[in-house]
Image: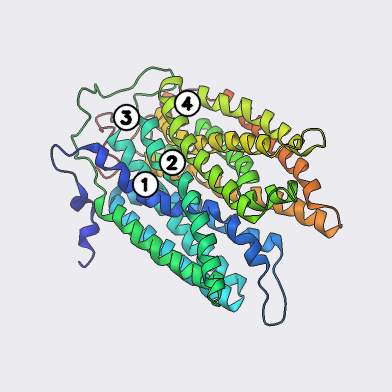
Amino acid sequence: MALAFLDRDHSVAHAGYSRWLVPPAALAIHLSIGQVYAFSVFKNPLLALHGADGAAWNLKEVGYIFSIAIAFLGISAALFGAWLEKAGPRRAMFYAALCFGTGFLIASAGAATHSLLLIYLGYGVVGGIGLGLGYISPVSTLIKWFPDRPGLATGLAIMGFGGGAMIGGPLASNLMAYFKSAGQPSIPYTFITMGILYFIFMMFGVFTIRVPGEDWKPEGWSGHNKTSALISTHNVDVSHAWRTPQFWLLWIILFTNVTAGIGILEQASPMIQDLFKGSVGPIAAVGFVGLLSIFNMAGRFLWASVSDTLGRKATYFCFFTIGPILYFLLPLTRSDKLNSVPFFVIAAAVLLSMYGGGFATIPAYLKDLFGGFNVSAIHGRLLTAWSTAGIVGPLIVNGILDHYVANKMPREEAYPLILHIMSGLLVVGFIANLLVRPVNEKYWLKDQTIPETAGAAH
């Protein structure tokens, strides 16, 4: 077969292979697909586009692009999670690169012809499928390489996704400025260029990824990390895992954490410009998006690593205690007495670190509760919470903003309501996290000879 080199058997590491060579491959994928977090940089330029009839898109219509992309991320992760275990990460990462790059090319045609449906199809559907495949394949692979430190492993993989906006935001902004100054259609040409660049960069991950041999385990590791009642020494099959109360509690935890984070992230650039008119311009707003990306990325590695010591439940306790307070206080930063851009930026950065940390900690939480046998498939199904949040979050944000604009009220007056809703959602997540208990033994796989690092392919 022409694509036989993508088979799982061709990516098994040789004896003595260093597991520390695997994280760069994971980062190549996640730094690329993490560009979706910089989508807010495209919002105002897309709103400024006009069709042949002079019509323009509104904020809600443009916001759906991001929502569709995140929705298909979760859908594709849920559908292809079990297939990934059998096909191997190299094939999944190749298809991810193909879909993600092609999505940009289709979206460029949509921007050129002022067809929102084409942008939905390209950036949203096709690109979203690339997001889902690219997201779960490095995560599951690194968990197999680092069974002794699953939090660190997921942090290494997922921190790249959080850092994607740090590259994607300035890249998109500079490309649009360059093509505009050259008298070319800025958004279509930018989409084409980014699609090609990201495809090439993701190919580095495709060709360098490796999976451990069937009997491999870290030197000096006993085979278990039993330090808490929540860390099970048993495995649960994906067909049973999603029927447990623990799965749905974690679903609520991820949904509330993501929805709240999107409240800032999806609207980051316009939000800070609206709240601090005259003090923060478009260039500074791009810098703000980049700063949030840094904290989003750093939080994924830091919080996930800390969870190996602190525990997953205790880590989420921190998120759902500090988070609601900061979301509640955030609108006060623009009050007449305070009016502090630095305080707003610092609070938002801390919130984004916990938002990112929630993503990186959840796969390790799943492994603790359900074992490592079907962790990719279970993680894929759990990511439907992200899909749902990707729809609900922007609907809340853009729906409230459009309501204020339609009623001729200042847009900046809408943000306190939005941020207080996000605060309330995190309280729901706090309750769900408190209710998490060990998985009942009736769900355990009876054959416990399955090695934790092997995955469903074996």
Q: Earlier in the sequence, mark 2 or mark 3?
A: 2
Q: Which residue is mark 3?
A: 446
**Dot 3 amino acid type:** Lys
Q: Earlier in the sequence, mark 1 or mark 2?
A: 1
Crowd rating for badge 1 (residues with CA inside 10 Å; few <14, some 14–19, many 20+) = many
Depth order, front residue of 381/428: 428
Mark 2 vs mark 3: in front: 2
Secondary-structure class at tag 4: helix
**Dot 1 amino acid type:** Leu
**Dot 2 amino acid type:** Met
Q: Which residue is mark 2?
A: 159
Task: Judge from the rendering whether residue 201 lies leftward or rightward of residue 1; answer left or right.
Answer: right
- Disc 2 to disc 4, C-alpha distance: 17 Å
Q: Is the C-beta separation of discs 1 and 2 under 8 Å?
A: yes
Q: Which residue is mark 1?
A: 27
Secondary-structure class at tag 3: loop
Q: Is residue 234 visible?
A: yes
- Disc 2 to disc 3, C-alpha distance: 35 Å
Depth order, front residue of 394/40: 40
x, y (%) of residue 46? Answer: 63, 66
Task: Judge from the rendering whether residue 196 lies leftward or rightward of residue 413; answer left or right.
Answer: left
Mark 4 vs mark 1: in front: 1
- Disc 3 to disc 4, C-alpha distance: 26 Å
Dot label at residue 351:
none
